Image: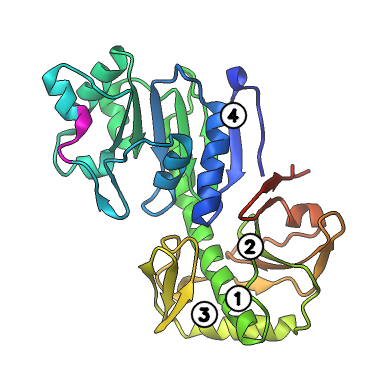
Amino acid sequence: MATTFVHEHLAQAVYFAPRGKKRLLFLGVNLQQRYLSPEDKLIGFLGDAGAGKSLLIRGMFPGLELTNDDDGINIRPLPLLDDSERGHFRCHTYHLDARFEAAFTQPWLIAEAVKKAILKGHRVVIEHFDLVYPFLGVNAEVLIGVGEEVIVTRPTIFGPEPESIAKIVFESIKYRRMAHSAEDLTSMILEEMGLAKPEIHSDIKHGFVLEFQEAPDIDLDLVEQRVQDLIQSDLPICFLDDEHIRVGEMPYPCTGPRIHIRRTGEIKGFHLLREFRFDPIQRLFTIAGIVGEEGYLPSRPVDLVVERTTNTKSNTWKEV
């Protein structure tokens, strides 16, 4: 889902946050093309660890060397601080993770280095911007929050403040993690029942959509019950490598292995829509799963298929 605005008058754009590496990178490219200006000097990112901030940054700023990411530390000492002390800024764009750097440097020192770089005409991309904002005294030109949704906004003197965006995305990320974990459990069960692993995925509020070229010959009640059995077993879910997770003792392919809850028992309110829905335009059959205690249930096809992404293309459908 996306609410689009002309760049100069951007108030807020909202996208469902995809759960695969390629899909996050592709979204980052789209955000860069739509909402960034070459003159933007301060870009702030907000969101919990593992939400996909680093992948979005890689998509938005190709070639930018991140100082650290989920795989570890890439550059030490921090180039921004090092260049600030030298009085000579060598890079056009700097990256820093304010939460990570707080373990080594006082936030006010980080803020001073950021302000020096900006005044010299350089760009700074900051993860966990809300932690350094009180010491900066100036808001980011573009704020991007990553939770269940990706929120893009261009703040004015009236806001929004980083804390308000952070509150939204930190609260909503649990639904994205639950939905992704439930999606993988459902795919596992479908494969055990003889279906090929779904290659087309869509995103809906508090849930997921699996799409097939032909109507699957399966009992959705049985699928749901078997997924519920896995949830009740409270199996651990953990990162295995960049392309796999481990559910209990079983490895399973996954394109977003860091975006999961810790145990299957943390999935709340899981259920499947008890019918296959046919998309007459794309000519695909869909299976939809919902998570969350609120009991959200899409009642129309337009609620169901909002954003579709494959490995090669992305079509965004506006919700009405």
Pointer 1 residue: 186
| Residue position marked by numbered label 3 in the rendering | 231
Q: In this view, does 168 lie to the left or right of 34?
A: left
Residue 137 is situated, as x and y percent measured from the top left of the image, at 31, 20
Quadrant where the image shows the N terminus: top right
| Callout in the foreground (1, 3) | 1
Residue 34: mark: 4
Q: Do the residues labelled 2 and 1 touch (CB within 8 Å)?
A: yes
Q: Quarter of the image holding residue 120? A: top left
Q: Which amino acid does label 1 sit on?
A: Thr
Residue 29 at x, y = what percent?
Answer: 54, 38
Q: Kindly identify the residue that appears in the image at 47 percent across and 19 percent down.
A: 38
Q: In this view, does 279 lie above or below 122?
A: below
| Span shown in magenta | 76-80
- Whichever of labels 4 and 3 marks the residue nearer the N terminus, that label is 4
For mark 2, what is the residue?
208
Q: What element carries label 4?
A: helix
Residues at circles 1 and 3 in contact by the CB criterion of under 8 Å = no
Q: How far apart are marks 2 and 4 (CA)?
A: 26 Å
Distance from label 4 to label 3 (Cα)?
40 Å
Closest to the camera, between mark 1 and mark 4, is 4
User: At which x and y percent is residue 318?
Assistant: 74, 42
Closer to the observer: label 2 or label 4? 4
Distance (Cα) linking label 3 and label 2: 17 Å
Residue 133 inside the magenta-drawn segment: no
Q: Main secondary structure of the magenta part?
A: loop
Q: Which of 238 and 167 is in front in this view?
A: 238
**Secondary structure under the numbered disc 2 in the rendered image:** strand
